[in-house]
Amino acid sequence: MDFEHIVVLITVPSKQVAEQVSDTLLEDNLAACVNTVAPIHSRYIWEGKICDDEELLLIVKSRADLFEKQLVPAVQAVHPYDVPEIIALPILMGSKSYLDWIDESTTA
């Protein structure tokens, strides 16, 4: 892995689920910060049909080493979707103080 820090994108169906997922990640020290962007308009294919929904987008700052074995299972445990969107993008650059803060905040 050539990068240490990630931004994770997670879509959720409601403010209540957004808070539940955010609280889980923060309380378990799997995220340093979770931003909620709402509303977003999502169009996607599910079970062979085009779906059209209003959702919220969580933008999570975390560490790459936490993603697969800890962060993803934590989200899946509280998320109502059968197949939730949980995707990670590498943080290629960031201020040293911000990246240090992510490290200090994600002690899982």
Image (cartoon, rainbow, N blue to C red):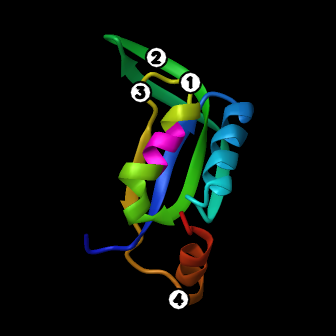
Callout 3–callout 2 Cβ contact below 8 Å:
no
Tell me which residue sits at (46%, 26%) in the image: 43
Q: Is residue 93 above or below residue 96?
A: above
Viewer-closest of 63 and 95 = 63
Q: Quadrant of residue 88?
A: bottom left
Q: Which residues are magenta?
A: 71-75
Q: At numbered mark 3, what does the secondary structure look like: helix, strand or loop?
A: loop
Q: How much space separates mark 2 and mark 4, taking CA atoms?
A: 41 Å
Q: Does the magenta stretch mainly form a helix, a strand or a loop?
A: helix
Gap in Å between the C-alphas at discs 4 and 3?
35 Å
Residue 22: x and y, percent?
A: 66, 47
Residue 59 % position (x, y) = 57, 53
Q: Residues within 10 Å of mark 4 (few under 14, many from 20)?
A: few
Q: Earlier in the sequence, mark 4 or mark 1?
A: 1
Quadrant in which residue 28 is drawn = bottom right
Element under label 2?
strand
* Amino acid type for the residue under numbered disc 1: Pro
The circle drawn on residue 83 is: 3
Query: Where residue 102 appears, x then y in whole percent?
Result: 57, 73
x, y (%) of residue 41? 56, 32
* Rendered residue at 42%/70% (across/down): 91
Identify the residue shown where x is 53% and y is 76%.
Answer: 103
| Residue 42 in the figure: left or right of residue 1 | right
Q: Is residue 5 left or right of residue 74?
A: left
